[in-house]
Image (tube, rainbow, N blue to C red):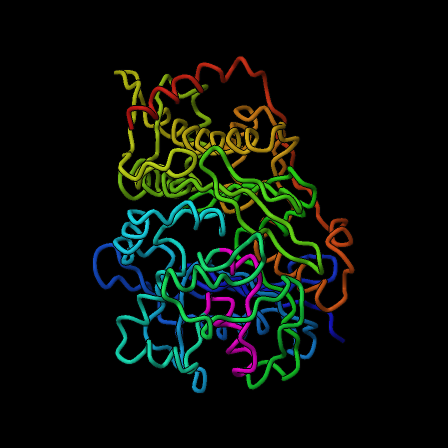
Amino acid sequence: MTDFLLAIDQGTTGTTALLIDRSLRVHGKVNVEFPQIYPRPGWVSHDPLAIWQSALDAIAQVLAQTGVAGNQIAGIGITNQRETTVVWHRETRTPIADAIVWQCRRTADVCDALKAAGHEADVRSRTGLPIDAYFSGTKAAWLLDHVQGARAQAERGELAFGTIDTWLVANLTDGAAHVTDPSNASRTMLYDIGERRWSNQLCELLRVPRQILPEVRPSAAIYGHTRNVPGLPDGIPIAGMAGDQQSALCGQLCLAPGSAKCTYGTGAFLLMQTGPERIESRNGLLTTVAWQVGNDFHYALEGSVFIAGAAVQWLRDGLGIIQTASDIEPLARSVADSGGVIFVPALTGLGAPYWNQEARGIITGLTRGTTKAHLARATLEGIALSCADLLAAMEGDLGRKLVELRVDGGASANDLLMQIQADLLQTTVVRPDVIETTALGAAVLAGIGIGWFKTLDDAASSWRENRRFTPGQAESVAGLKAAWQNAVQKA
């Protein structure tokens, strides 16, 4: 009996496999890490074969953990680190080089040249993105230019390009499928999100041959079936895909325009669903594709905070103030407030809505009475204030206030952080019962793909709330917000 969906959550440092039932309950979860490769400062790579092996290992271990047999899997959903770029030989599925990871800055000079030549307005108009080395297009061109013979092979149609979703499906189907979905395609800087197709103009501008690009299919669709996958029977449909942040938006069942989620991880990613309307941000946010289900094509506004959980890691590893990340909550609770301390955690620059790569972290308001508890609380406030800036930008673009913010990711388990966030936003913050929402979104899409659910609305009844954080008085945070803005200007 096919009782489970297998969700593969392929992330930057490891691959997680989860087994999820029809009620969207998680029955098993296994994460397998793989090595990070740093060829030189500012460069980040992954071995695509190591990624694939980590997926195989995670699948085998979660089946062993739960005692579920492969023939009990009704379908597979995939969510993935976005923008990371792989190019491989079609016939053998051998990568031509290591993957270039989304964090890698090796094509920054190419992007600077494109901006200097005046192309940014056109690229943003077509893609919703600024020209940046973050995205996949210049990464693919770099591989073709720096691997001997690769560009000629690409022109002959012998090579295939893909983000990690595409790479996984190619391996799951033994090379039969070369596909992606609009949410991942929209992160390449090659996909026209208005015309909903690969752009010939952008391919020419970025020097990426059209013939290496995958077919773009809806986010809930049968992309292919398993074939020759160790540990899995042939014939399981791969039926849902979305980039990790869009998948989390889907997993939070943020289905109404204006609904939003924030994922608190190393950084923080806030996405607001805008429905079929593509909204161009006036406040430094990205416009991206949320998902496509059937003929319904939905967009989102996206903002990123570079440092969230990483600030807590810095307190632990850099300053030794705490022993484990979970220590920060009781330490921060031991004081009533931060004692006037403001921490702007711009340890790698400021993301949206400021976009200041030169900004650096700053701590202000220190006195002889400042303790490590005050700094711990200021760290949580700094994370929440960074996210509040994002939401204010989104509300400005949308033209109305958010009713509630759904939250997920590891740091969403911190009750004090979530209460601070609700107070600062003056918006109810809601944490779900299952905080593995990235994988959950992939499972929901796969459930639609195989017919378990007819629509996303059909799956919404399975979303379960864990806790609701109601905002306190606005006056209590007004001074904190003012002090924060002063500190940001100095960062």
Q: Percent from the top left, x then y, of residue 381?
A: 43, 28
Q: Residue at x 37, y 77 (%)?
A: 95
Q: Is residue 409 left or right of residue 382?
A: right
Q: Who is closer to the viewer here, 129 or 353?
A: 129
Residue 230 seen in the figure: no
Residue 373 seen in the figure: yes
Q: Who is closer to the viewer here, 98 or 141?
A: 141
Q: Residue at x 67, y 67 (%)?
A: 221
Q: Residue at x 26, y 37 (%)?
A: 358
Q: Who is closer to the viewer here, 359 or 307?
A: 359
Residue 180 in magenta? yes
* Residue interval drawn in magenta: 162-186
Q: Who is closer to the viewer here, 362 or 303?
A: 303
Q: Residue at x 76, y 56 (%)?
A: 455
Residue 4 to residue 347: above or below = below
In the rendered image, the quadrant that contains the C terminus is: top left
Q: Percent from the top left, x then y, of residue 44?
A: 30, 60
Residue 459 to residue 39: above or below = above
Q: Indicate the quadrant where residue 136 lies.
A: bottom left
Q: Percent from the top left, x then y, of residue 74?
A: 70, 72
Residue 302 in magenta? no
Q: Percent from the top left, x then y, of residue 50?
A: 39, 73
Residue 66 to residue 227: above or below = above
In the rendered image, the quadrant that contains the N terminus is: bottom right
Q: Is residue 262 left or right of residue 377?
A: right
Q: Indicate the quadrant where residue 361 lies.
A: top left
